[in-house]
Image: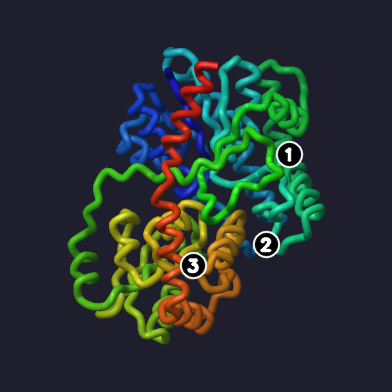
Amino acid sequence: MRILITAAGSRGDVAPYTGLGARLRADGHDVTLATHDLFAPLVHAAGLGFRPLPGDPRSGRRDGDGGNRQLMRTAAAFVGRLGSGLADAVTGDGGRGLPDLLLLSTTTAPLGRHLAEATGVRTLDVFLQPTAPTGDFPPVVGGTRSLGRFGNRTAGRLALRVTDRLYADAVRTLRADLGLPPATPSAVRRRHAATGAPVLHGFTEALVPRPADWPSGHVVTGPWWPHQGVDRLPAALEDFLAAGPPPVLVGFGSMPADDAERLSGLVVAALRRAGLRGVLQAGTAGLSAAGDDVLTVGDVPHAPLFPRLAAVVHHAGAGTTAATLRAGVPSVPVPVMADQPFWAARLAARGAAPAPVPFRELTAERLADALREATTERSYAEAARRLAGEVAGEDGAERVAEAVAAYAGA
């Protein structure tokens, strides 16, 4: 079967699908991943076909300084470019014909459903975040304070309508280009939900138990781990790890910073206040520092590194959050935007992290205090190891492979 996976956003929004695609390829499927050019090396390394999607997830203001209006404008522009690119990825595969199955991520599903309507290709939703309204918690992009069961469900429905508005212009253009009659995003979303098609979620119930009030077809499979080809760490990093006690990794993934030098200085000052060695992962934020007690690295695999750390300071993206759980190490979450406050709050609620420090409130003093708490209070390490034991028994990609086989045969 020819399967096209579509994923757009930051590295953490894309990398888990490389592992998922590799698992499906092992079943004999012809798997292609459509995403941004920036992530083509990840896709090729997993042995998957690649199709480009427009946009650079590093562009635009991503630190929240412009407020919600700026964030919405940036997101709307991103979505507008994504619509036509997604259509090309689905229908323009070098004359090989349409895929047999389209797997849609959280960011591509609101557009992919219209392509499915136009082409007749079957789809499955494969989400990294919980998006369906529930009374158990507020929507992942609507703040972390519970509004009670009725309030949480109401806020969840409102969040879906906000997403519909965000995609409205792109949907209008896409449907016209595809020759489809006008239809609102909300109407198509409700029509899709009424089919009862499975919605598969790639996170762990150790962090977010499946809500009892979700529709029966909504399944939490467990995490989908990024494809990991080479587990070797750079020699300089191996030497640094061997030269002293376990360090702290500090990295903000695909989140850029307006002043990399200031942020790097803040991080180093916090590490030294807390009496800790540090590994700075440059990332899009451009972290960089040098010294006997600090090392700067580029892109390194999480799986062999994280278990050897005292803690991880991160932006609480879904992928990095899952990686810290798998490694059994405490987190110091510094959420920036979108779903990151949700995952940060979940880590704290399960005892694997101290209270999150929002990025816009980050100071050397606050970060040093959180680092001391995470690395000296045994409860955090104990909770992290307990969660790692729960996650170890999950095989999310296998459950998706089973669902794909069942759905294809239905």
- CA gap between label 3 and label 2 equals 17 Å
- On residue 144, the disc is 2
Q: Position of residue 200 (x, y in %)?
A: 55, 36
Q: Position of residue 308 (x, y in %)?
A: 30, 66
Protein image colouring: rainbow
Residue 15 visible to an observer of this rendering: no
User: Amino acid type of disc 3?
Assistant: Ala
Q: Secondary structure at mark 3?
A: loop
Q: Nearer the viewer, residue 264 or 384?
A: 384
Q: Secondary structure at mark 1?
A: helix
Q: Quadrant of the N terminus?
A: top left
User: Amino acid type of disc 2?
Assistant: Thr
Q: Is residue 49 above or below residue 204?
A: above
User: Amino acid type of disc 1?
Assistant: Asp
Q: Is residue 161 above or below residue 137?
A: above
Q: Quadrant of the C terminus?
A: top right
Q: Position of residue 123 (x, y in %)?
A: 57, 25
- On residue 106, the disc is none
Q: Is residue 285 above or below residue 377?
A: above
**Left or right: where does residue 246 sit relative to residue 33?**
left
Q: Position of residue 130 (x, y in %)?
A: 62, 46
Crowding near pointer 3: few (<14 within 10 Å), some, many (20+)?
Answer: many
- On residue 352, the disc is 3
- Give whichever of discs 3 and 2 has the lower sequence position: 2
> Which dot, 3 or 1, sits closer to the camera?
3
